[in-house]
Image: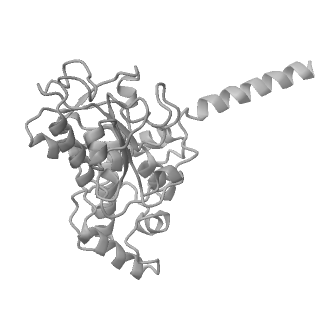
């Protein structure tokens, strides 16, 4: 009888653990290193946090020279290496604990992160109201951390690490040749912000939208049909067609009669120019673009461009710039 009771208690404890622990706890969450040339929501949050600390910086989501100077000034004031690179130490000094009733730029940083990482569209008011608290608790539950509505270092780290979802109104269209559907569209805030910027710049060519294949799953990890795409920094795009119908017609290769080399060249140039210093490589087998130093040959990349973005420092050396 005692053995049976023990087994029942073990089973109840296991069930309780299953119910309490969310399926998406981010054991590997880290502060994403950002530096000059990066774009995206994490850069925007960084700029708001710099404003909170009294730095005069424009919150535009672009890590330009003004942001770099503000970062160096902040680092110097905090006794950190003044290199202009926002890594774990600088993030740790930038983030502040906030809760309901707070107001100001740090709350704006929180709100833009919540909107991007949880696909909501709440107003960025800079006021930590009850709606913001509810959104924080929902994220904390999603991340598997203490759901108390208070945003401290652990919540900031998990929120900044969490992947972002592209805005297809930016000039992108969704293509899913590997069967991963919309679930495969998630990437780091930098990768998403940079590919969106490339799409906006490319739109001025008048050659149609850019077809986006997979980036990765919401929390990274293995993704069917890919040997990489596990850290949110690999982005697949389709080449451009002469009829600009790449979002509605069949996918082509660089050997196809409907392949538009000039337009695809413009696309690669937009990718590189909107993320200076943060494009590790572009796999695509057009020999002309390879000879121009724009792309790199790699097996099975005749029909799509594989863009690998990188960071100044990344836990995986394949993604170090």
Q: How many marks?
A: 0
Occupied quadrant, residue 9: top right
Whole-percent x, y for residue 6 in the image = 85, 25
User: At 32% across and 53% down in the image, what residue appears?
Assistant: 128
- Indicate whether 264 appears above or below 155: above
* Left or right side of 161 for 53: left
> In which quadrant of the rendered image does the N terminus lie?
top right
Whole-percent x, y for residue 136 in the image = 40, 46
How is this picture coloured?
one colour
* Left or right side of 28 for 150: left
In this rendered view, identify the residue nearer to me: 159 or 209.
209
User: At 83% across and 22% down in the image, what residue appears?
Assistant: 7
Whole-percent x, y for residue 211 in the image = 24, 30
Whole-percent x, y for residue 198 in the image = 22, 46
* Left or right side of 120 for 143: right
| One can see residue 145 in this view | yes
| One can see residue 274 in this view | no
* Left or right side of 84 for 12: right
In this rendered view, identify the residue nearer to me: 236 or 180.
236
User: At 49% across and 48% down in the image, what residue appears?
Assistant: 148
> In which quadrant of the rendered image does the C terminus lie?
bottom left
């Amino acid at each position: 009888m005692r053995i049976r009771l023990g087994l029942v208690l073990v089973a109840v404890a296991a069930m309780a653990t299953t119910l309490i622990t969310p399926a998406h706890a981010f054991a590997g969450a880290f502060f994403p290193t950002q530096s000059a040339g990066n774009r995206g929501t994490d850069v925007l949050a960084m700029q708001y946090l710099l404003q909170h600390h009294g730095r005069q910086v424009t919150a535009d989501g672009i890590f330009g020279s003004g942001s770099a100077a503000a970062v160096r000034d902040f680092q110097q004031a905090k006794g950190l290496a003044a290199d202009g690179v926002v890594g774990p130490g600088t993030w740790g000094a930038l983030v502040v604990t906030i809760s309901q009733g707070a107001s100001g730029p740090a709350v704006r940083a929180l709100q833009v992160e919540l909107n991007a990482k949880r696909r909501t569209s709440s107003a960025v008011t800079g006021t930590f109201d009850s709606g913001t608290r509810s959104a924080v608790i929902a994220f904390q539950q999603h991340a598997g951390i203490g759901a108390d509505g208070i945003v401290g270092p652990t919540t900031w780290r998990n929120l900044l690490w969490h992947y972002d979802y592209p805005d297809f109104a930016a000039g992108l269209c969704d293509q899913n040749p590997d069967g991963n559907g919309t679930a495969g569209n998630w990437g780091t805030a930098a990768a998403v912000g940079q590919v969106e910027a490339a799409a906006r710049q490319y739109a001025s060519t008048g050659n149609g939208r850019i077809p986006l294949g997979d980036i990765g799953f919401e929390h990274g990890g293995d993704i069917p049909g890919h040997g990489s795409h596990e850290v949110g920094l690999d982005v697949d795009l389709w080449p451009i067609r002469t009829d600009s119908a790449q979002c509605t017609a069949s996918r082509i290769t660089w050997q196809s009669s409907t392949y538009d080399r000039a337009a695809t060249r413009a696309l690669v140039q937009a990718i590189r120019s909107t993320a200076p210093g943060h494009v590790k490589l572009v796999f695509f087998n057009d020999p002309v673009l390879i000879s121009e130093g724009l792309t790199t040959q790699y097996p099975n990349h005749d029909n799509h461009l594989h863009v690998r973005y990188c960071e100044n420092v990344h836990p995986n050396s394949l993604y170090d710039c």
